[in-house]
Image: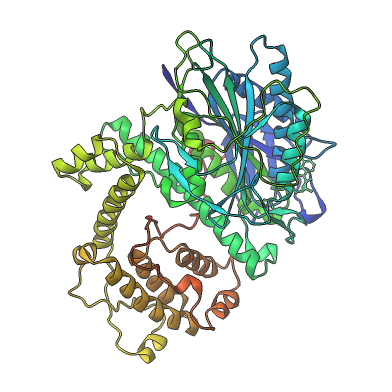
Amino acid sequence: MSISKSIACHVRLRPTCPNDGFVNPDAIKISGNSISAMNKENDKRYHFDLDKCHDAPSTQEEVFECVKPMIEQAIAGQNTTIFTYGVTGSGKTHTMQGNQSDPGIIPRTIESIFRKQSETPNPFSVSFSHVEILKDEVYDLLGDRSEPKKRDIRTSAEGQNVVADLIIQPINSVTEFDIIYDAAAKTRKTASTKLNSSSSRSHAILTIYLQHPGSDAGHTTQHGKICLTDLAGSENNNLTGNDKERMRESSAINTSLTTLGKVIDALNEKAKRGHKGSGTAFIPYRDSKLTRLLQDALGGSSQGLLICCLAPGEKFARDTINTLQFAKKLKSVENRLTVPDHKTRRVSAPLPRATKAANPAFKVHTGSGPRHSAPTCRVALSSIFTNTPSMRGGNTILQDVKENTTAGKCTTDKDRSDLNKGMTDQQLDRRIQKIVSEQMAIQAEKTKPELVSVGTETECIDAKPVVVVDPIPQNVGHDTMSKMSEAEKDERARVIVSHARKLHHSGNLHGALELYKKAFEYAPANRKLSMRITEIKLSIEGMIPTSNVTSSSNSKPKMEDQVPKSGMKRSHGHLDSLAEISYEESPAKKGRS
Ligand SMILES: Nc1ncnc2c1ncn2[C@@H]1O[C@H](COP(=O)(O)OP(=O)(O)OP(=O)(O)O)[C@@H](O)[C@H]1O
């Protein structure tokens, strides 16, 4: 059985700290579960109703009280996701992790799980994994960090996005968890910025797996999992004083958070259309690793709780309103929870034994009397999920593809019948790629700007103020593009990038942006190119000093300017990906204050 449930949205205001600068004590007002925030100009107030508002004096214990029921549900077999969101330095890591004297959600959750386990006559087993997403690459925090390896994300036969070769560490006590988790958390990338002396540079996802043993020799199991996600903070680089490397991290953080916002927008759009009974929407989960891994929590089968963290300083006024807008949008996303049925537990193969953390720093403490046998071998994570409830009846990506095909974007009978067959990941990727390139071609056709062909370098450099330069001959349309070989596309992208660099170098950011975007259409797997686009957009928006972006283009061709070699696996990406800052006041609340 499945039920619809919205993601619960809570807010937590951090107490004032020295980094806040000027704080207007009346700017953010909390009354019950309503919160209002003043804009930076002090002439407009924005009101939001959320599920719970924690004011500055709130304690970690009070925040955890709201999490407790979700732990109960996870123990009962439900998938749950809790994530903290907010600007850098707003208290996300404090809320999620806390410190020894003031523990946050993670240590409290573990304690609560083991307390519950000790009270249960037929105890469940507990294991966990811990990954970080740094510059849109996934790393296993339980792996050997002296040689960090990028991990792929794969889609399991059941439609779950899972990290390949992930280490699942069984734990038998709180102490054991503390030792392993502390060592892993220390390897998460942090750095000092002007806004936070220990700023997280990555998104961290800790997943706790709970498995109930079955009655028939371990073959009947029920799984629940709790996914605790500490997102990296959105950053305004005018405030952080970031250097070049920090800026790159920041750009990746902002891009992935923007994709998160786009996924939520698309889900809301889809819900709206669904109610009217017309059509479906494409959900761009695959645009970032973050949204791929959070897919189950965003319109999937997981129960969700978002805790938005706010910083009280006046300089964060705009971020506060953005964060609250994000919460408002997310609140209307509905997940379809699969309600665990205790009488008819799902039957699956036995849960494979998990792998010990590879980091030699992890000395597992076993003195507290382990309940379960020690793990012996590495497992493919996908098999762990064979019994994970999936509200969309299988492969969610396949579902998206199906939606797009029925929406008329890929319409042959063969396409449809192929989609209904079991597909390998590779086949699925190829099919998605095909659909995406068709969509891109349609989109590009719709939004095709007036083209100006530029023949010489001088013309490129002199083009002012914004010139859309298209080195593609006018008679090469987007239909032709979809028929091009990979090598032709790479070559085309290379030519465009070289023009883009010249404009970039000359300081014509708008012109360069258009060209990089065009190159990206031919090389959608080039993440560094996508980061370059984001950097320029941030620079145009004034969030990154212009000198930094342009100076980086002075030298010889950089990695991000290289397009992928033919035959590389391509993923699709949308380019208009910077956060739209909307200051729309809730109409119902206008004039409240
Ligand atoms: N509720 C709170 N009570 C007391 N101190 C807090 C609270 N929230 C945050 N802090 C303190 O504020 C500082 C910044 O918090 P934290 O590192 O959690 O921010 P963050 O949002 O995770 O930042 P980033 O995105 O840069 O990683 C830390 O020193 C933290 O201890």
Q: Is residue 593 visible?
A: no
Report whether 189 appears left or right of 491.
Answer: right
Q: Position of residue 251 (x, y in %)?
A: 56, 61
Q: Pick the quarter of the image with the C terminus.
A: top right
Give 149 or 158, whichever is nearer the viewer. 149
Q: Position of residue 77 (x, y in %)?
A: 54, 20
Residue at figure coordinates x 74%, y 48% from the top left:
186
Q: Is residue 446 visible?
A: yes
* Residue at the extreme left: 413
Residue at figure coordinates x 41%, y 16% from the top left:
1
Residue at figure coordinates x 48%, y 79% from the top left:
557
* Residue at the extreme front: 376
Rendered position, 443 above or below 383: below
Give 212 or 291, whichever is nearer the viewer. 212
Instruction: Count the numbered circles shown.
Output: 0
Q: Position of residue 96 (x, y in %)?
A: 69, 38
Rendered position, 416 above or below 573: above
Rendered position, 142 above or below 499: above
In this picture the colour scheme is rainbow
Rendered position, 262 above or below 109: below
* Residue at the extreme right: 101
Q: Position of residue 134 (x, y in %)?
A: 59, 54
Corner quadrant of residue 416: top left
Corner quadrant of residue 135: bottom right
Report whether 474 appears left or right of 513.
Answer: left
